[in-house]
Every structure is written in structure tokens, then in C-alpha cells.
Amino acid sequence: MRKKTKRLVFEKVTVLDAAAKGKTIGKAPDGRVIFLTNTVPGDVVDVQTTKKRKAYFEGVATNFHTLSKKRVDPVCQHFGVCGGCKWQDMGYEHQLFYKQKEVENNLKRIGHIELPEVTPILGSKEQYFYRNKMEFSFSDSRWLTLNEIQCDQQIEDRNALGFHIPGMWDKILDIKKCHLQRDPSNAIRLQTKKFATENGLTFFNPRNQHGLLRTLMIRTTSIGEVMVMVQFFEDDKEKRELLLNHLSKTFPEITSLLYVINPKQNDTIYDQEIICFSGRDHIFEEMEGLKFKINAKSFYQTNSEQAYELYKITRNFADLKGDELVYDLYTGTGTIAQFVSKKAKKVVGIESVPEAILDAKANAERNNIENVDFFVGDMKNVFNEQFIAQNGVPDVIITDPPRDGMHKDVVQQILNIAPNKVVYVSCNSATQARDLELMKDMYKVTKLQPVDMFPQTHHVENVVLLEKKELDE
Ligand SMILES: C[S@@+](CC[C@H](N)C(=O)[O-])C[C@H]1O[C@@H](n2cnc3c(N)ncnc32)[C@H](O)[C@@H]1O
């Protein structure tokens, strides 16, 4: 049997700061830190603890004495239940302040990095409706609000099409309006739910593993293309075609209508065959005259407008003269590689997802870019002595790893090559700081630019320029 933690109550706790992972912090009377989930720095609250550890507590505010001046009214009706945009109740300028602070703190405290003059974080022009990709889950037992549970009425509609309740793999919140993706996203999701419910298409139950409909993915691009992919649990041709025909008739703007039949336990589609129902099996995004093909499995930065800003910063930091060999590590569909290619002699991209590399090659051909080469494989295996002997010693390395940062062998390989410049793009400044510390003896951080790609969330992107130290530095 699990040991129950005794819940403690602390009164009138002042919320002092924002902490990692979107939490905030206050102090308990004994000086221990309390990590809170539902407060904004500046609030004064009563706290009930939910977890007790030697060095800290976790808790929630149960009563608010003073509301912080940093607060704003959340725009979304689902705020507080949906895990999506947890910082919606904090003014955007304060969100930016805490993001910048987190980046600087991580680099100083984890990486022990001496920071150059810090450029203010680049905020996003769009603070809502900035995402180009959303994934919604179907459920036949939607998350009920306290009001619904307490009221006597029989609940008829138990279907949901929306997001997972944070930390609960089998509980889905039905979403009426999401403020993250432009229309037709909301319209498509609502229509899919309505039509499926009215026509007896069953919604998935992950516990019992039954039901027809599993997930709905919607991708949009800045040039008006729309991809919709429905994931089914079972192969029911009649019902599948009923829904897909309805979507294609109701939303003629859908450029690419896809489906996948996935009878596995989990709903990841990366090992599944994607079938094109109508239109193309891909959509296009454009950036600075370059065209990028995106299929259902491709990685593409989810905030296209800010991705453009991020890439421009990356290109400026690299400051290419035209005669350099550049390596673009973790190249995805080769967007950065192509973006900097005009200013380089040659760019070599490496990436582990084979489909992304196929897209990268097709994109480069479509964009008439001839000075790029792409290779597929796990970075720590591909990026080795033999690879460098075959492809040349890079003058500049651009690296944009996933949240876990770079494998230590990859960091070591960069140190072995010792290019004059490394541009490190990261979506997790904690792992970036860890990697930078390993490079600290050879490289100096000379430029740093945090970028906000995800307003209303705690996530922050950071670009760092590393320049090789002089021998006597
Ligand atoms: C943050 S994304 C960057 C993509 C690209 N630079 C862009 O801006 O679109 C990280 C990429 O690293 C790839 N990746 C993750 N682990 C990898 C590994 N061990 N080896 C090579 N690539 C990997 C992912 O598939 C993903 O495309």
C-alpha cells in the first residue's frame, strides 16, 4: 500500500519567483522551498502541500490573499484544467522576463558560463494562434468538471476530442475552443466530433482498448495549406469513408487528408503506414522564398513565424562569408541547412529520421540548392572520424539537438574538430548549459539570444554563439 503524505497548510505565503517547468516558488516557514502550480509571482496565498521531500515541498494555492499585479485574465475557457498554456494568467512581458531569467540562470548555474552582454529575449508577434500543428485525442469517457459530477442530471455526452489532462494518460478534456492554432483548426475538430457522434462512430477507450477513433492531427501553413490526419484503431472502411468524405466535402481547404489504422496499444504513428485519402500526402511551407515539403511524420518548427526569426539569428551568429564548409547537426528536414546555404560553400546535414532526410533532399532539389548534402543516422554513430574524412572538416558547426541535448560523444567530436565557431540552438537551456560546460575550456560564449517560440507556456528557445578561445585566454 502506498504511504500517504501528510498534507500541511502554510498560510500567507508570498510567491517569490518562477521556477523550472512552469512552476513558481514560495518559502515554507522552515525555509524550505515550495514549488507551486497555480500561482503567479507576487501572489500571497495559503498553500496545501501535495508532496514533501527533504529539501522542498510541492503544493497548490487553496486561498488567495493578494493577487499579483503581474496577473492578467486568461482568455481560454479551459485554462486551469487543460495543461496546454499554463502561463496564460501572467502578462506577456512578465512571461518574457522569467524566460530570459531561466536561460541566464541555467547557463550560469548549470554551465558555469561567463555570459556576454545579454540581448533581450525576442518575443513573439503572435501571442495566440501561433502553432502550425496540433494533435487531439478521442475518448469515450471525457474528463468531467466538478460541477458536472456534483449535479444530479444524467450526462449523455461522454465523448471528448481534445487534450490529455496533465499527468493522466487516459483522461481527455473535451476542447470547445483552442487558442493555439488558427482556423480552420477549431472548426475541423468540432465538426469531426459532431459528425462522428451523430453517426455512431465510436471514440477510443485506452483502458479497454476499444473504439474506432483515436487521434486527429491538424497542420496548417503560412501559405494556407491544411493537413488533416485521422488515426483509427480499427479497419472499418464504411465508417472511415463516411467521416473522411464528410470532412473533405465540408472543408474544401484541406490540401492533404490522411488516415492511419493503428491497432497497437500506443498511439504513436511513427512506425505506422500513413495513407492518403484525398489531395496530396504532404503540404508546403514557405520561408524567404524557400519551399519546404512537410509530411505527417516530418518535424517542422511549430511556430513558423518565430522559426523564421530563430533561423535569421542562427545565420547572423554564423556570419558566413561564402567559403565555409558548414555542418548542420540534427538537421530535421534540412531547413537551417538550406536557409544558410546561399552564404556557405557547402552545408552537410545529419539527422536520425529517414523520412526527414528524404524530405530534406527533395526540398533542396525543389529549391535548386546544390551545395547541400544530407545523411541519416544516430548522431553519435554517424558523426565520426570517418564521416569527417569523407565530408571534410567543417569551418562552422550549427547544432540544434532535441530537448535532451547532445550525446557526450557528439560534444567530444565537436571538440576534436575544434571549428572556430559553433552555433548552438536549443529548446532546453538546462541541457544546453550542461553541454556548454563540457566545451568551456575551448570555447567562449560570445553571443546569446533567447527567443520565445511558445507564448503562454514556460518553454523558451536559446541560440548561443561559441567562439574558439585564443591560446592565452
Ligand atoms: C529540435 S529538432 C531540430 C530540427 C531542425 N534543425 C529544424 O529547425 O527544423 C531536433 C532534430 O533532431 C533529430 N534527432 C533526435 N535525436 C537524434 C539523434 N540521436 N541523432 C540524429 N538526429 C536526432 C530529431 O529527429 C529532430 O529532427
Image: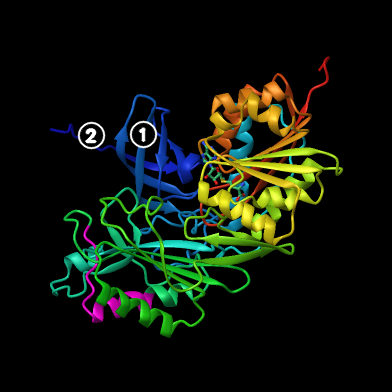
Task: Say the numbered circle drawn on residue 5.
Answer: 2
The answer to whether the beta carbon of the residue marked 1 is less than 8 Å from any atom of ligand 1 is no
Task: Say the numbered circle drawn on residue 57.
Answer: 1
Residue 200 among magenta residues = yes
Q: Identify the amino acid type marked 1.
A: Phe
Looking at the rendering, the quadrant in which ligand 1 lies is top right
Helix, strand or loop status at disc 2: loop
Which quadrant would the C terminus be assigned to in this image? top right
Where does residue 207 sit, x and y in percent of width and height? 19, 53
Q: Which residues are magenta?
A: 190-205
Left or right, residue 331 beside residue 209 = right
Left or right, residue 261 beside residue 458 = left
Residue 403 among magenta residues = no
Where does residue 177 sit, x and y in percent of width and height? 42, 71
Q: Identify the amino acid type marked 2.
A: Thr
Q: CA distance from mark 2 to mark 1?
A: 11 Å
Q: Nearer the viewer, residue 272 or 441?
A: 272
Q: Residue furthest top?
A: 472
Q: Residue furthest bottom?
A: 249
Task: Say the numbered circle drawn on residue 333.
Answer: none
Disc 1 residue crowd, few under 14, some 14–19, many 20+, Cα 10 Å: many
